[in-house]
Amino acid sequence: MAQTIASPATGATPATLPLKALAPWALFVGVLALVLLYFIGAEQGATSVFSGTNVHEWVHDGRHLLGFPCH
Amino acid sequence: MNSVTIRNLLVRGMLAGLAAGVLALVIAYFLGEPRVDAAIAFEEAHSHSHSHGDEVEVVSRGMQSTAGLATGVLVYGVALGGIAALVFCFALGRIGRFGARATAVLVSGAALLVYLVPFLKYPANPPAVGDPDTIGQRTALYFLMMLLGILLAVGATILGRRLAPKLGNWYATVAGGTAFVVAVGIAYAFLPAYDNVPHGFPGTLLWQFRLSTLAVQLVLWTGFGLIFGHLAERVVATRAEEAGTTAEAAPVAT
């Protein structure tokens, strides 16, 4: 790491991106992506936010083929 | 400016995830769907107590295997592409002397590893396999195992970095890898196993189904690593050029 900070312009190792700039993106996008993955992978299987089986049935094949426990 | 770089990399990550998702969708449709159909045929032929034929079909098989499958795989690709892009932003320049493309491929490899950790204990199951009574436990354990894989991989990386000055890069990497495998093995030994394969379910079909799910992941992450690496290289290269010009300009100015 000390090398990259000392010589950011050598081109061999790219400069690091500061963690302060990365943190809000990581938090927001991370949470959003996890919500999406929850609806694709687990909604109306183990737990349900919405009642019924529409979400489960719609993504049924994707769930099986992506390796999520489906039923 | 760094925020702009992160934004550019995130957008490219989601686009690369979408493109890799399309590739994975092709594999899922042509390799996976025939096995899903065969498993459903087995399920319907062997269901004595509850016949699925009488149930009202909420979503038709035709929709499930096309639009439904596409929704699942593409949203999965975009969401994980975004996450992988942010992991890339963190890893860039921090994991050794790797350029943008090599870092992208390494992040993809790590993602595949994170998929494999729960898969080896709780593999993908076709329809007809799996007891609905234990779906809650199996889902919880699946995600727990995935989280464990991520934490252990991070732990092994930190361990490897700590050992590197003493042992050298090669043996520090070997030690970190060994620690990871041993820790995952211990987790496998203690977490409960589920054997839900119904009597008479064809072994070949189960094997082919699981292979096809692995093929989907392999194509998704290989595609993502190569496509995102290509796109990220441009963003990072532009940054390096800017840094280069300012560094060169500085001595002239003084």
Image (cartoon, coloured by chain):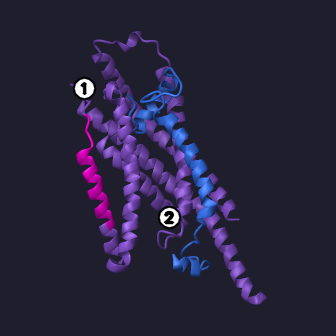
Q: Which amino acid type corresponds to the residue marked 2 in the rendered image?
A: Thr
Q: Nearer the viewer, residue B102 or A18?
A: A18
Please tell me whether residue A1 is drawn above or below residue B90 in the rendered image: below
Quadrant where the image shows the N terminus of chain B? bottom right
Which residue matches tag 2?
A: B103
- Picture coordinates of residue B236 (x, y %)? 62, 67
Chain for colour purple = B
Q: Where does the C terminus of chain B fall, quadrant-wise? A: bottom right
Q: Which residue sits at x=64%, y=73%? A: B240
Q: From the viewer's perspective, is residue B12 above or below residue B41? A: below
Residue occupying the far right of the picture = B253
Marks 1/2: CA–CA distance: 43 Å
Amino acid type for the residue under numbered disc 1: Pro
Q: Name the residue under label 1.
A: B198
The magenta stretch is B176-194
- Looking at the image, tell me whether mark 1 or mark 2 is earlier in sequence order: 2
Question: Disc 2: which chain?
Answer: B
